[in-house]
Amino acid sequence: MTAGDPRLDADGTTTTRDAMLARRFVTLADTLVDDYDVLDLLDQLVTACVDLLDVTAAGLLLKDQRGSIQLLASSSEATRIVELYQLETREGPCLEAVQSGRTVVADGLTELRSRWPSFAASAEANGFGSVCACPMRLRDQTIGALNVFGSEASQLAADDLRIAQALADVATIGILQQRSLHRASLVAEQLQSALNSRVVIEQAKGVLAEYAKTDMDGAFRALRAHARSNNRKLGAVADELVRRRLDPGEVLGG
């Protein structure tokens, strides 16, 4: 897709990618405030990748305060499974991007199988044939990786690769921005809080999926929509849902 080609925006209107990209950067930049929600920032990031780039899905891995790599955001359940499998087997392009601080690209299953056999099997089983992992890096510090997946063996266009890296850079700046003299401890607290919230969000997705007899992707879309329409944090809504302080029917619009 080129810059001037029309595309359907999140609100259902037709617009160009340039216009969508500008809006997404403004939205991401608007989260860079003292009390921004890390999980919401990262969810917006992976959603923007799927909307703006010629990719099927996106995921994001971050280092926690102990240096362990954790999954923080995914655009679909299939992406979540593949990313978690990488962490379990300690093998894959996304992990390599975090560890090396360099962009890692694999354009097809043949390359994936030769470099990361276990990851390739998981990717193929979940409908992915290519991947590009962009490091979330500021100077010499790498805190994670933004990973985009394609359903077929194809090379990500140079413009798409630059956009993916730019989106990753915006999120990195947001996470590492200096808001106090104790930036390191603040970042550690933010990331640990996000990791804790991620666990609760997965539980809340399960509650909604069971209640509505839907899949996990549909459950997450409902949870996210409710949080955003009520100007609330994802983690807070999920916690209330899991603790039965919020009725699933209210979240689902029933």
Image: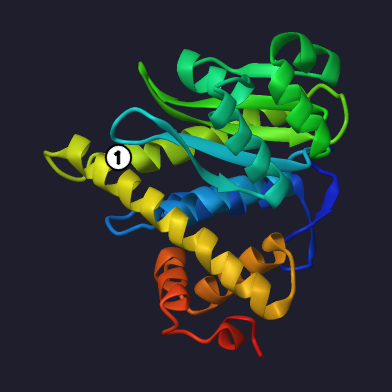
* Residue farthest to the bottom, as pictured: 254
Q: Which image quarter holds the C terminus? A: bottom right
Residue at the spot 41% in from the left edge and 84% down from the top edge: 245
In-front residue for pair 253/202: 202
Kind of element beneath mark 1: loop
User: Which residue is pictured at 79% across the width and 66% down the height?
Assistant: 13
**Quadrant in the rendering for residue 64:** top left
* Residue situated furthest left in the rendering: 181
Looking at numbered disc 1 in the image, what kind of residue is underneath it?
Gln
In this rendering, does residue 224 appear at all? no
Horizontal and vertical percent position of residue 202: 53, 59
Q: Nearer the viewer, residue 89 or 56?
A: 89
Residue toward you, 87 or 20: 87
Residue 94 x/y as whole percent: 59, 25
Residue appearing at x 32%, y 52% in the figure: 193
For disc 1, the marked residue is 177
